[in-house]
C-alpha cells in the first residue's frame, strides 16, 4: 500500500538518477462519468481509480517516481508520498489539462534536468500494460521528438452535422487514437506548451502533449498500443475497466 504523508510532508526531495518520472494530471471533475464523485476517485475493484493507475505505473521497474497534479480544493486525496516504494510528489493544477501538465512539469523541473525524458499519463487509464510502456520508452527515447502510445482506427468513421445527421464518411487510413503515456524531454515539452500559450486560446484546446509539438511543426512518433489501454470516461467504462483489470490479474481490494 502507498505510504501516507504526515501533516506538512510533501514527499522525498530527490529520486534515483536512472529511470523516468511520470506526471499524472488528476485535477478534473470527470462529470461525464455520471457521479458526484470525481471519476478519478470512483472505485475500481475496491480502490480509487487514481490509486489503481498510480500503482500500475509504480509497478514498472523503469518508472522511479510520480508527480500527481490535483485540484486545489481536492479533499479526497489520500496524502500518499510513496507508492510501492516509489516517491510521489503533488501540486495543484489548473482549469485545463494543459495547465495541470505545466504545473506538474514545473515541479518535476526541481528534481530532474531539462534533458530528462518524462512521461505524462492520464489518471483515467488504469489498464495500461507494462509491455506498452516498455515499447514506448524503447522507441520514443530514440526518436528526435518523442512519442505517444496510439491505436489505429478500425471502425468506419462518420462526420456529422450538429443535428446528428451524417455529412460524410471519413477515410480511416492513417487515422489513430491518441493514448497515454506520452514521452518527451522535460525541457522541450515545457517549451512546446509555452509556445502553444500564445494568447490565441489554442493552448486550452490541447488534449494531449503531442499536440503542442505538432503546433510547432514537429512530428512525434506513434507507438502502437494494446486495446486494453482504455480510457474511463463514461459510467459503462468502469465495468469494462474492472473486467480488463481482472483479466490482467489484478486482485479486488477485498480479496
Image (cartoon, rainbow, N blue to C red):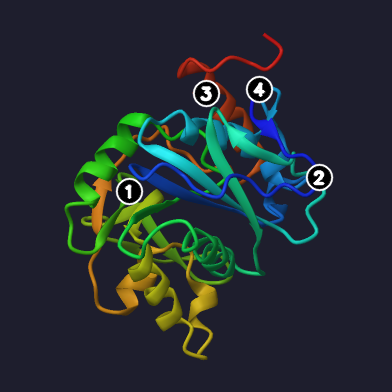
Q: Which residue is mark 4?
A: 45
Assign a secondary structure to mark 3. Answer: helix
Estimate the spatial distance between the alpha carbons at disc 1 and disc 2, rounded to whole Å.
40 Å
Q: Position of residue 199 (x, y in %)?
A: 52, 91
Q: Earlier in the sequence, mark 1 or mark 2?
A: 2
Q: Quarter of the image for the N terminus: give it.
A: top right
Q: Earlier in the sequence, mark 4 or mark 2?
A: 2
**Left or right, residue 172 beside residue 11:** left
Q: Quadrant of residue 81?
A: top right
Q: Decide which of 44, 109 is in the foreground and name it.
A: 109
Q: Which mark is residue 245?
A: 3
Q: Which mark is residue 7?
A: 2
Assign a secondary structure to mark 2. Answer: loop
Estimate the spatial distance between the alpha carbons at disc 1 and disc 4, rounded to whole Å.
26 Å
Marks 2/3 in contact by CB < 8 Å: the verdict is no
Q: Position of residue 38 (x, y in %)?
A: 74, 48
Estimate the spatial distance between the alpha carbons at disc 2 and disc 3, rounded to whole Å.
33 Å
Q: Position of residue 253 (x, y in %)?
A: 68, 17
Q: Which residue is mark 1?
A: 150
Outermost residue, top side: 255
Residue density around tag 1, few if under 14, some if 14–19, many if 20 or more, within 10 Å: many
Assign a secondary structure to mark 1. Answer: strand
Q: Decide which of 93, 106 is in the foreground and name it.
A: 106
Marks 4/3 in contact by CB < 8 Å: the verdict is yes
Instruction: Write the residue at 56% across / 72% down.
Output: 162
Estimate the spatial distance between the alpha carbons at disc 4 and disc 3, rounded to whole Å.
8 Å
Q: Earlier in the sequence, mark 1 or mark 4?
A: 4
Which of the two marks, 1 or 2, is nearer to us in this view?
2
Estimate the spatial distance between the alpha carbons at disc 3 and disc 1, rounded to whole Å.
20 Å
Estimate the spatial distance between the alpha carbons at disc 4 and disc 2, rounded to whole Å.
29 Å
Which of the two marks, 2 or 3, is nearer to us in this view?
2
Residue density around tag 2, few if under 14, some if 14–19, many if 20 or more, within 10 Å: few
Amino acid at each position: 500500500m502507498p505510504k501516507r504523508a504526515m501533516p506538512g510532508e510533501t514527499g522525498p526531495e530527490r529520486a534515483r538518477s536512472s529511470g523516468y518520472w511520470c506526471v499524472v494530471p488528476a485535477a478534473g471533475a470527470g462529470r461525464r462519468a455520471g457521479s458526484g464523485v470525481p471519476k478519478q476517485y470512483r472505485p475500481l475493484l475496491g480502490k480509487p481509480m487514481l490509486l489503481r493507475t498510480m500503482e500500475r505505473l509504480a509497478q514498472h521497474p523503469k518508472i522511479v517516481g510520480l508527480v500527481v497534479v490535483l485540484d486545489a480544493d481536492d479533499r479526497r486525496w489520500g496524502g500518499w508520498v510513496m507508492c510501492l516504494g516509489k516517491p510521489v510528489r503533488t501540486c495543484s493544477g489548473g482549469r485545463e489539462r494543459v495547465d495541470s501538465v505545466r504545473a506538474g512539469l514545473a515541479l518535476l523541473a526541481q528534481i530532474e534536468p531539462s534533458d530528462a525524458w518524462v512521461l505524462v499519463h492520464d489518471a483515467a487509464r488504469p489498464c495500461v500494460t507494462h509491455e506498452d510502456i516498455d515499447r514506448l520508452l524503447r522507441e520514443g527515447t530514440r526518436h528526435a521528438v518523442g512519442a505517444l502510445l496510439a491505436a489505429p482506427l478500425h471502425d468506419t468513421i462518420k462526420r456529422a452535422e450538429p443535428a446528428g445527421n451524417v455529412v460524410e464518411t471519413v477515410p480511416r487510413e492513417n487515422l489513430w487514437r491518441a493514448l497515454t503515456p506520452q514521452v518527451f524531454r522535460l525541457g522541450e515539452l515545457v517549451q512546446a506548451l509555452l509556445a502553444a500559450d500564445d494568447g490565441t486560446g489554442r493552448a486550452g484546446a490541447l488534449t494531449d502533449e503531442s499536440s503542442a509539438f505538432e503546433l510547432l511543426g514537429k512530428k512525434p512518433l506513434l507507438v502502437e498500443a494494446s486495446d486494453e489501454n482504455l480510457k474511463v470516461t463514461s459510467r459503462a467504462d468502469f465495468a469494462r475497466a474492472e473486467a480488463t483489470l481482472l483479466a490482467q490479474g489484478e486482485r479486488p481490494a477485498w480479496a
